[in-house]
Amino acid sequence: MSKKVAIIGAGIAGIAAARELEAVADVRVFEKSRGLGGRIATRRAEPFAFDHGAQFFTARTRQFQSLINKFPESVVQPWSAKVVTLEADRKRFKREWYEDHFIGLPGMNGLLKAMASNLSLQTGTQVGQIAANGDQWRLLNEHQESLGDFDWVISAAPAPQTLALLPEVFTDLPRIAAAQYSPCYALMLGFDQAPALHFDAASVRNEPVAWIAVNNNKPSRPEAASILIHSDNNWAEENLDTDQDEIIAGLLASFEQVTGIDGRSAKYSSLHRWRYARVEQHLESDFLLDSKNSLAACGDWCRGNRVEDAYLSGDNLGKSLASLLG
Ligand SMILES: Cc1cc2nc3c(=O)[nH]c(=O)nc-3n(C[C@H](O)[C@H](O)[C@H](O)COP(=O)(O)OP(=O)(O)OC[C@H]3O[C@@H](n4cnc5c(N)ncnc54)[C@H](O)[C@@H]3O)c2cc1C
């Protein structure tokens, strides 16, 4: 009989691990959010749409390139954006990208949806505890209700959540605390009339705003003018507990400073705080695997801070565990 494997988290790391394991095990993925993708996220607010997490991904390894090549251009393709660098006095420099920058379609999480199409996935389900039950692990939700018994459990959640979840017997538990993140605010603005921005994406220097993307200029996105603003990570760290209205005011002032556009005229406005946005300190490991206790962990925080790192962590863990089980 095939082993039962539970994976906690349907970001790209968890999905990648599940894809490698599904041929040799009975795999179930649990995701606390309503949708999959984790930080590769798309917010829809009709008629607007925003990729409010990862903006694009690069593919520096054959392993990740070969995943991208498996899917059609309707799901993932290079983004040939007009990119600039902006500064406070509205100085603008044209930038070149020296490697392909890929995006998912019709939103950033489009690739994730395609990757997960054959997987057994339970969304809207937060795993609250992993409890020993004989020689298996019992997963419990936040109401202490059983989600099933499993031979193996993989946490593909961000490091602080993995640290809180994995049982104390996990051999690498103390290492997980070394992973460090910085936060990021995402401000989403929808306009009746497209503001006059002469770029698709702008990287901003020395300002509370660090990145501006004209989301509707990306291929296959809805036409309604949708502007995505990301804060600088250090600024977000300094303002982690600042009142939401103040955060919005600070980002709008900075946006106006570098573009000359008054974002207060937006018809739609929403702020999202990514508490664990960017990995600042990773573990320099592909993944963590404790074969004695049948527990493992993966995610960007193991090996880097990009989508590709998260994919490689999950994919490599899935391959290693598949060879143990297979
Ligand atoms: C604002 C922002 C911009 C970024 N820009 C880029 C970029 O341009 N290019 C790039 O390469 N990378 C970028 N990144 C980083 C990239 O998004 C991440 O490295 C990558 O998506 C991490 O994937 P992951 O699977 O490791 O984790 P995640 O995507 O965080 O997935 C973890 C999942 O676990 C779920 N989860 C957590 N706890 C539980 C629980 N108890 N029960 C069930 N589910 C749980 C979460 O809901 C989440 O879906 C950006 C990130 C952010 C936030």
Image: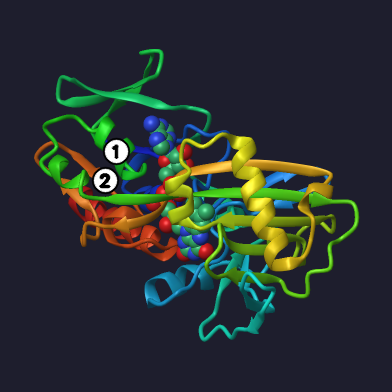
Q: Residue at x 40, y 18 (%)?
A: 142
Tag 2 and tag 1, C-beta contact below 8 Å: yes
- Horizontally, residue 165 falls left or right of residue 13, namely left
Secondary structure beneath disc 2?
strand
**Image position, residue 101 (x, y; %):** 56, 74
Residue positioned 63% across, 69% down in the render = 88
Mark 1 is surrounded, within 10 Å at the Cα level, by few (under 14), some (14 to 19) or many (20 or more) other residues, namely: many
Mark 2 or mark 1: which is in front?
1
Q: Position of residue 129 (x, y in %)?
A: 30, 23
Q: What's under tag 2, amino acid-wise? A: Ala
At 51% from the left and 83% from the top, the residue drawn is 99
Asked whether mark 1 lies closer than 8 Å to ligand 1, one says: yes
Using residue 81 as the reference point, say whether residue 59 is left or right of it. left
Residue ID for mark 1:
162
Q: Mark 2 to mark 1: distance in Å?
A: 7 Å
The residue identified by callout 2 is: 297
Residue occupying the point 77% across, 65% down: 260
Q: Position of residue 41 (x, y in %)?
A: 58, 49
Looking at the rendered structure, the secondary structure element under dot 1 is helix
In terms of sequence position, does the residue under pointer 2 or pointer 1 come before the other? 1
Above or below — where is 144 with respect to 59? above
Q: Tell me the crowding category of disc 2: few under 14, some 14 to 19, or many 20 or more residues within 10 angstroms, Cα based.
A: many
